[in-house]
Structure formats: C-alpha cells, structure tokens
Image (spheres, coloured by chain):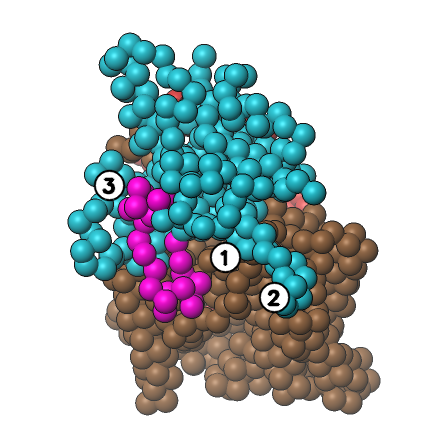
Amino acid sequence: MAHRWGMAIDLDRCTGCEACVVACHAENNIPISTPEQAATGRTTHWLRVDRYYEGDFPDVKVKYMPVLCQQCDEAPCEPVCPTYATYHNPEGLNVQVYNRCVGTFYCANNCPYTVRYFNWFDPVWPEPMQLQHNPDVAVRMAGVMEKCTFCIQRIKRGKDESAASGQELADGDIQPACVQGCPAEAMVFGDLNDPESKVSRMAESSRATRLLEELGTKPKVFYLERGR
Amino acid sequence: MASITWLLSEFRDKDSVIDAIRALRAAGVQPGDLDLFSEEPLELPRGVLDRPSHSSLVAVLGAAAFGIGGTAFVWYAQHTYEVITGGMPVFSFWGTGVITYELTMLGAVLSTFGYFLFESGLVFKHGRLKRDKDAPVPVVPPEKIWVRVRCEGGNTVRPTAALQEAGAVSIEAKTGAGL
Amino acid sequence: MPGRVKVTPPELLPYGKIREDLFRPLSGLTKKYFIAILLPLLVILFGAYAWSVQLRYGMGVTGLHRPVFWGFYIVDFVFWIGISHAGTLISAILRLTDAGWRKPITRAAEAITVFALMIGGLFPIIHLGRAWRFYWLMPYPNSRLLWPNFRSPLLWDLTAICAYVTGSVIFLYLPLIPDMAQLAEHNTPWRRKLYKALSLGWTGSDTEWHALERAMKLMAGIILAVAVSVHTIVAWDFAMAIAPMWHSTIFGPYFVVGAIFSGLAGLMIVMALIRKLMGLELYLTKHHFDNLAKLLLLMSVLWLYFTLAEHITAWYGNDPSEMVVFGARTRTRFAFLFWLMVFVNFVVPFVLLGIRKLRSITTGVIASFGILLGMFLERYIIVVPTLSNTRLPAASSMSYLPSWVEIAITCATFAGMVVLYLLFSKLFPIIAVWEFKPHVAEDEL
C-alpha cells in the first residue's frame, strides 16, 4: 500500500522556539535572509512560525502556529502551473520540480497559506555557512519557486534503507528536520494510510483541525487546537 | 490555339456598367469572361454579376477542424505523459473548453484569410484566374470603372456593340495568344 | 446634433484631394519626426537596460515580495491588452453595423490593437522569474518529456493572445491591400517595392473586391468573438484563483467593459494627436470625437455598474477574508487610489463630456488621459490589495511599491507605442483611403 505522508502539530506543545525553522534551513539549504531582505519582505522560510497576539499590553498572550506547506490533496497551486513544475507525487506530496519552474508566480498567488517562496536572487550564504550545505538537496537558482517538501530526501533515504535492510518502515523511522528538531515534540510525521501510526491517531483527535479547511484544499497537516 | 481578344472599355458610373453587363450577358458572354476593375468596391445588385463564394463554409470548416484538432491534441498531450494530479482530472472539459474555443477561432481566422488569398487569386491563381493570368490589366484612374471582356476567336462584334450601347467612354481591343 | 455642430462630411470632398491629403503624411521626413522617434527610443533603450538588469540579477530588482508576487508587470499586461480592444471593438462592431462614421477611424484603431497586443504580450514574458524559458509554455515535443498543463489559465492566455494577434494583424492587413496597391503606383523605388510585395499584385478586379469584402465581414465577426474572449481570459487569470475578491464570476465581463473603456480613451488620444500632427482636421471632425465621447460615457456608466456590483456583493457577503481586502481598497491603504479611480473614471468624464457646453476635442483628450490613469489604477487595485492581504493574517505584508526597474519598463512600453505608431503612420495611410472615398452612386442600391 502506498504511503500517504502527513503531519500533526500539537499547538498546545508548541513553544514558538523556532528550532524547527532553524532545522529546516540547515536541512534544505535555504538561504539566510539579511535584515534588509527581511525589511522588504523577501525572507524565505519553508517553515515559519506565525504569531498571533491576544489582548493588550501588558496583558498579552502570544499564540504560535508553525505553518509549512500543507501538502493539500486538492492543491490550488497545482492546476494553475503551466509547466507542471508543481504536481502531485504518488505518495500524495505536492512536489516542486525546480528545473521545470519558469517563475510565473501563479502557484504562490493561488496558495491560501502563502507558504511558497521565491528566489528573488541567486542564493548566498554568509561565510562559512556555505560549507554546511546538505548534499541531498538542490540549491535553487534565481527565478524559481520553492517550498516545503516534507524533507522528501529523508523520505527517500528512509525507503531506500528499509528496502536495503529488508525491514519494514516503522512509524517514526522517517522524520523531517523540523520534527526531529522540535524539543517539545509538538510535531509528528508519519503515514496517514497506516491507521496505527501516531499521526493518524492524532488526526483522529477531537482537537484536530486543518487550516482553512473550508476552501476544500484537503491539507495533510493537522493542527491540534489548544486545550481551553 | 485559339486567339483571344480582350475588350477593355472605360465607364464613368456604375449604372452604365450594370447596363453593359446585362447587355453583354444577353450577347452570350459568360460571367467568367467578364472582369471589372475599379479603385473601390463595386456593389452590384443581385443577379447582375454574382460571384458565388464558399468563404463562410470554409471559415466554418476551418474553425471546426482547428477546434477538433486542437482538442484532440490536448487530449493526446495530457495522456502521453500522465501526471498524477491527486484526484483532479488530467484532461478537463472546463479547462480544455477554453483552449478549444480559442483554437476554433484561430481556425476561422486562418481559413478566412487563406480562402481570401485563394479566392482573390492574389497568391494562387486557379480556374479562370489561371487561364487569364496573362490578360491585360487596365490601370484604372480614380472614380472610373473598367470592364474587361474575354472574346474567344476574335468574336468581338456583339460584345463591342453591347459596350457601346451601354455608354462606354472608350473601347480598345487587345489580341493575345490564349490557351 | 446636426443643428448644433456644423458637420462637413469629408466624404463630400473631391477624391483627388482626399487621396493627396491622406497620402501626403507618408512622404518627407522632418526634423520633428526624427526627434519624436528618437526621444521615445531613448526611453525604450533605458527600459531594455532595466530588463537586462532584471534578467541578470533576478526578480529581486523589482519591488515584488512575498505575498505580492504580481505587481506592475501584470497591471501593465492587463492595461495593454485592454487598450488593444479599441481597434477590434470600434472597427468590428461599427463595420458589422455599417456605421458610416467609422470610416476615417477604423485603421487608426486597428493599428492600436496590433501594437498594444505586441506590447501587452511582452509582459507575461517580462514578469517570469526565468524569462529565457518562456517557451516552455508552448506545446512541443521536448527533452523534458512533458507537455504544458492545459488546465492552467496561463495556457489559455497563450492560446487566446496568439489567436488574437493573428486575427488582428490580418484584420489590419486586409483593408491595407488596396491602399498599398495605390501607393505602389507612384513612389520612391524602395517604397514601391515594399508596397508591391505587400499588396500581392492587387489589380482591383471585382473578384478581388468581392473576396476582400467577404473576408472582412467574416473577420469582423470572428475578431469580435476573439476580443471578448481574450479579455475574459485575462480576467480569469485572477478569477480562477481562490484569492479573496478575485474569485468572482463577473470578472470576465467586468474586464471586457474596462478594456473597451480604456481602449476608447486610448483611441481618442491617438486620434486627436494624428489629427493635429498630420493636419487631418478635415477628416477627423468634431463629429467623430462627439460620437467617441458618447461611447466613452456609455462605457463609463457600464464600468461604474460593474464596479458597484463587484463591491456591493462582496460587502453584503461579508466574508471575513474578502472584507479585509474590501476595507483595504475602500477605506484604508488603497482608499485614496480607489476613490481617485472612481473620480477620473466616472466623475471627470461626466462633467467634461456629459455637459454639452464643455464637450470638445480638448476636454475629450483630458478625460481620456484621466480614464487611462483610472483604468491603470483599477488594475493595480485589483491586483495588489488582494495579494497583500492573505487569508492567514500573519502572512500579510507591507504594501508594494514598484522599483525603478518596473517603472522604467512600464515607461518604455508607452514609448514603444509611440515609436510603433509613428513608424506605422509613416509607412501606411492612417485612414483607409479606399473605404473613405466617395462611393459611386452608392445610394442607388
């Protein structure tokens, strides 16, 4: 049976520490924005932590929400791409093929979650950070769109290793960088086709919800609401 | 090798041209042997010198051919390399419909233009236009209309009389080798 | 009407004079003409430099950022495709209804169509992140083993614009043939060669005239259908996205109306210019401008109606994400631009053109410039507020402002229009001579 990768994020556990963001940057060769770029809105974080504030100072509550590509089953970005740079892979992931992308921006405009990021310039890393590039992940040139892949390179490696060793993939064998890096264990990754996996069970939780579900995009990222 | 005589005659106004055409037809001249030359389009009443045309039919056929061909091409293209779309159709009626429409219109445009070039004989001479391709062409001054009559075997007496009667300003005959 | 404005129908002028008047602007090159071409050429050159900078360094040189991924280029695209609707609409509708007053303005309008399309068609390429790969949108067998995605509205754009360019070039070319045949008679050697080649050996026989008239009638119908579909598809680029205030069913007709509106305004300006610069006061009379002004008023009302319908449905729907965009447009960040747009698109035309005493060629041109500005703003107000107010509030961003690159390229396209038009009017009579001249005994039909 084919895998169907999904993620669950327990917002009750999320502390907003952004370790996931750092892990994602390191794993996926995401360029690090300068303050000037950030000021012009040109940051790139495949995974970002959105902050929502409640109440007035000094009585403020901050709520954190890690937002990454929701890997929609019916992704609005897919039908609008003229070159099939973004399409669905057999395991239900929204795949971004950098080589096919001509940069029409249409996918990003049609993404209700605004999780698509554009390479405004060729990427640069401050010395010596270019030395820690992950060889499994392509560095993207100026002019192409990119986004979270659920660490597809890790999924691939996990499946290869299981095929080589003859051992079935167990739940939790494959972990995207963000999940691995989360100290609060707020993020869980797994196979939604396996009813026993942790992510499937969390998706069944009464607290589980999906972002902008009403748009009919059928995301594969589940958010577990805060307990009240 | 019959010798052909061309009668070229100048007229001042459309009415006398209409009279001339009627007289020529009565004199046994076929519509295919008659040509008018003017610097502006001449609209003659129906039945005087009709030039039947298939341009509308050609436009419709061209449109249909492009529309169907284009749609078939899209279908082929979307099925030769099938992309997994996660439930969305690879070949969709709605999405392809727009392409079908545009290609239908493109087909109509191109076939109209192509048929214009063919029908007018500007690019490709065919039928009587090919037969008459070496015929003399009058240089028409503004506001004048010239009538050219093709007379086979030098049989010019009756047509000349018809032209004169209708009020031709001038008539000249040119003889050339025909088919 | 006739009692108030004294109309001298140019059809009554002697034919020799008409021909001379309309062919005269083609010959002779003055210093002014060179300057008029040279200045815009410099602007184009600078625009080309700006584009080269963008190609060299990336889209970062524009003012775009996340989430405003579409900006001036898309606004320009919609704007120019809109302008292109002048020709087809004026020329095709008036031709089909056989409105006599169209005769001196059809060619001027058709030429606008072709040039505006050429310019507008550049923007989908300019706005690409990797513009040098634009041909990947074309369906051809390739090493990627991939056909384009025909479900994408961008593919619709591509086919629609290709069909429209082909159609409008032919629509402009067909009625040029008889004029070029006349021009080939007496002219300088290279021009004679040019006109002879382009007129395909036109002799003026009734067979040719018949074919031409039939083709023009068919083309007028077809081009009308294409023109409406083209701007509908441009609108659908937006309407097919599930972005708030874009996902609207009336976007198709709304854009078509806006396109005709701006196209007519563009035509008004161009006509006033050629009238003045080429001394065609006898041919482009107040009568024509009067009729155009009335059409402008009609389109202004229609535009207002659609704008109202678009906004009132959003307001009553009260969808939270739409209301954010609605508020940005009408009350907060973009409110000034929005109300300025309403002012120049509706109030100004109605004061200047609706009040009889004020209606003149000058006020018509002023109103038209206002309308062009207003329609540019309209597209900006459609594109930017929606993008900068995302569905997830945390992803919304600061406002978008174009960079010098985008402004330079935009200016270059206006300069490009000037240059193309100047070249065209030097090579071809800007008024169709054969269509215009007195018809022999036409009324006896």
Q: Earlier in the sequence, mark 2 or mark 1?
A: 1
- In the image, which is nearer the foreground, mark 2 or mark 1? 1
Chain C: colour as depicted: brown
User: Given the image, what chain letter belongs to the residue carrying mark 1?
Assistant: C
User: Which kind of residue does numbered mark 1 sit on?
Assistant: Pro
Disc 2 element: helix
Q: Which residue is mark 1?
A: C67
| Place of residue B137 in the rendered image (x, y in percent of width and height, measured from the top left) | 39, 55
User: Which chain is disc 2 placed on?
Assistant: C
Q: Which mark is residue B75?
A: none
Position of C140 relative to B47 (above/below): above
Q: CA distance from mark 2 to mark 1?
A: 15 Å
Indicate the secondary structure of the residue bearing disc 1. loop
Question: Is residue A167 or residue A93 the one in the foreground?
Answer: A167
The chain that hosts pointer 3 is A
Percent x, y for residue B138?
Answer: 41, 59
Q: Which residue occupies 38% across, 84% down?
A: C36
User: Looking at the image, do the residues carrying marks 2 and 1 touch, with CB atoms under 8 Å apart?
Assistant: no
Specify few, some or many for label 2: CA neighbours under 10 Å numbering under 14, 14-19, or 20 or more.
many
Residue at the image point whose x is 62% and y is 84% from the top? C366
Q: Is residue A135 left or right of residue C237?
A: left
Q: Which residue is mark 3?
A: A134
Instruction: Kindly identify the residue that appears in the image at 63 percent across and 74 percent down.
Output: C337
**Image chain in cyan:** A
Q: Amino acid at mark 2?
A: Ile
Camera-nearest label, 3 or 1: 3
Question: Disc 3 to disc 1, how far (Cα)?
Answer: 28 Å
Q: Is residue A42 magenta?
A: yes
Q: Nearer the viewer, mark 3 or mark 2?
A: 3
- The residue singled out by tag 2 in the image is C381
